[in-house]
Image (cartoon, grey):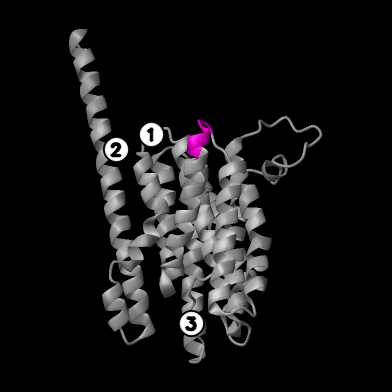
Amino acid sequence: MNPIDQYVLEVVVLPALIALSAFSPFLFAPLRRRAWRVEAVLGTIIALTFLLSFVTELDHRAVLRQIITIEGDEAPFERWHRLGLVALILIPASWALGFTRRKSSAARGMMSTLGYALVAAILCGALVSFPGSSPLIQLGQGALVLASIFAWLLTNQAVLWNAWVVFGVLAELAYVGGFASLAVMCGAVSVAGFGAAVLAGIGGRSALQIDPVRPAGATAIVLGTLTALIARCGMAQDTAGVSPAAWTAAALLPLASVAFSGRLRRAERNSGKTFWAWLGVAIVAIALLGLVGWQQSAKEGAADSGGDDYSDMYGG
């Protein structure tokens, strides 16, 4: 195995496989019967995959030094490493939210979700900062977290398929922006989203009375928080001039799941409903990546033209 394949296996594929292997039984009957537990499990799979990829790519001390002083540790403190700590916190938070919803009515359960969403937005705005931050930027960051959580609540039963697409887009933006470490972490979550979507689909078909997976609590909180913070981190660390608007659009991509809501309501089969809830996100994702690719090509072309002008001045 060549070094590149080994790197992708260790940092992208294995973290997703470990998280899926540990928690995939909850996507099948009889463990899937409790919706709150399934939500907690899916939130855990997403957050754990990111955390494992983060630790594999960097080191577990990159998380620890966010909260304690490590004796003899000479590595620099980097604010974007706070993403690893956020992923770690989101794992117990998934179960806490799921537990509070276990016997709640739909209305009370949604109130719990809204409360957690507000807490997540406030904490992310107050405690998670990236280079170049200001009070106004931190306020916008909290608002983006809240908006992203609400966007994920709209994804209906295509939530996992949309996680595959959205984190794939974030991985591509990070790669284009020159942030390879963040790209592989997003790639790992994208793989986990795809794997969880496949397993959840198989689990649902194996027992006809099981409802499709829908985001109502922990899943949306985890996905929304990670998506928004990754987008903000990408903006702050970008070295290739990818537009902040592109990063913001990526964080809010789940909103496109309502583009074909009419067809979704008319679909009779769950597979059809899932497809229509996914299609809008996929179309907008392709358009966004195409636009970013065109913008970057235009910048490179302008830079090359500028270089030619200077070479002409010196007789090149």
Q: Amino acid at mark 2?
A: Gln
Q: Amino acid at mark 3?
A: Ile
Q: Is residue 1 magenta-colored?
A: no
Circles 2 and 1: CB atoms closer than 8 Å:
yes
Q: Considering the numbered disc 3 on the image, is that residue within a helix, a strand or a loop?
A: helix
Q: Residue furthest right?
A: 71
Q: CA distance from mark 3 to mark 1?
A: 41 Å
Q: Quadrant of residue 88?
A: bottom right
Residue at the disc numbered 2: 296
Q: Considering the numbered disc 1 on the image, is that residue within a helix, a strand or a loop?
A: loop
Q: Is residue 187 left or right of residue 89?
A: left
Image coordinates for residue 55, horizontal then vertical, percent: 64, 49
Circles 3 and 1: CB atoms closer than 8 Å:
no
Please report the bounds of the magenta region as a residue range.
Answer: 131-137
Give the residue at x 35% y 66%. Answer: 257
Q: Is residue 135 magenta-colored?
A: yes
Residue 145, compared with residue 81, is above or below; it is below
Give the residue at x 59% y 60%. Answer: 116
Q: CA distance from mark 2 to mark 3?
A: 40 Å
Residue at the disc numbered 3: 202
Q: Which mark is residue 137?
A: none
Residue 214, compared with residue 119, is above or below; it is below
Circles 2 and 3: CB atoms closer than 8 Å:
no
Q: Residues within 10 Å of mark 2 (few under 14, many from 20)?
A: some
Image coordinates for residue 35, horizontal then vertical, percent: 57, 79
Image coordinates for residue 281, horizontal then vertical, percent: 34, 62
> Total of numbered circles in the picture?
3
Q: Considering the numbered disc 2 on the image, is that residue within a helix, a strand or a loop?
A: helix
Residue at the disc numbered 1: 240
Question: Of marks 2 and 3, which one's residue comes earlier in the chain?
Answer: 3
